[in-house]
Amino acid sequence: REPPKVNITVSKVWNDDSNAYGNRPSSINLDVYNSSGSYITSTTLSGSGNTWSKTIYDLPKDSYYVRESSITGYSSPSYSGTQVTNSLLRTSVKVTKKWDDDSNRDGKRPGSIKVILYANGTAFSSATLQSSGSWSHTFTNLPQYINGSKVTYTVDEDSVPTGYTKSGPSGSASSGFTITNSHTPERTNEKITKIWNDINDVEKIRPSSITVTLCKNGTA
């Protein structure tokens, strides 16, 4: 009597924004093992959707699982029986705006600035930085690879605020970038004159010197 046979369906699930960044290979190979860990066969899967599947026929009745090699741009596979899931490797990039303008003494600091995130030199995303957000922003869920190649992320501001100069960006994608805008506050001179109304110090009580305090907006 012939031993009983089973058919199994093996499947690949892609968690990669529908291959938005072109990292998927055209096909993948899965190795099939039985419950005792013995290699049984290999099969090739391909497709266009987010789940690729294939049925393998007439295997000896048993439970089976699959394994695959790593794929560039994706995290280590996760397995559930004969299903394997690959998730896109992602990263984040933080950018911070630093102001060197004596706490906005001249009131020239803008209310917000726009920064651009570049992937391999091409504009990829943008964000608005403002005081309510501590002048910082973190770009999240960024692909580490595009079209199978490692991405280099950089940032810059869209334009330098009027009256300021720019230095940077300093830092790196892993540690975070800082863009510094500098403005030298305007300076002025204040002359102080003391007038004595004492008949030219007739009583000889005028002090030899006095101390005055210069106040800004009512504050010393």
Image: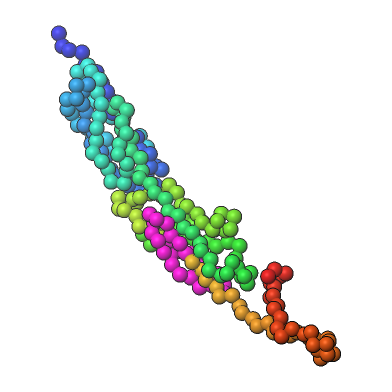
Query: Which quadrant holds residue 120?
Result: bottom left
Q: Is residue 134 left or right of residue 10?
A: right
Q: Is residue 19 left or right of residue 63?
A: right
Query: Which quadrant holds residue 46?
Result: top left
Q: In the image, residue 87 lies at what x, y percent?
A: 35, 40
Q: Residue at x 42, y 50 (%)?
A: 92
Q: Residue at x 65, y 83 (%)?
A: 189
Residue 125 on the magenta segment? no
Query: Which quadrant holds residue 35?
Result: top left
> Is 36 above or below relative to 141?
above
Q: In the image, residue 99 lies at what x, y percent?
A: 53, 66
> Is 135 above or below relative to 13?
below
Considering depth in this image, is 215 or 21 the residue closer to the camera?
215
Considering depth in this image, is 18 or 32 the residue closer to the camera?
32
Q: Residue at x 48, y 70 (%)?
A: 166
Q: In the image, residue 216 lies at what x, y percent?
A: 69, 72
Residue 159 on the magenta segment? yes
Q: Which secondary structure type mostly characterizes the magenta part of the structure?
A: strand
Q: Is residue 44 left or right of residue 198?
A: left
Please provide the residue range marked out in magenta. 155-179
The residue furthest front is 204
Considering depth in this image, is 180 or 88 the residue closer to the camera?
180
Q: Residue at x 69, y 75 (%)?
A: 213
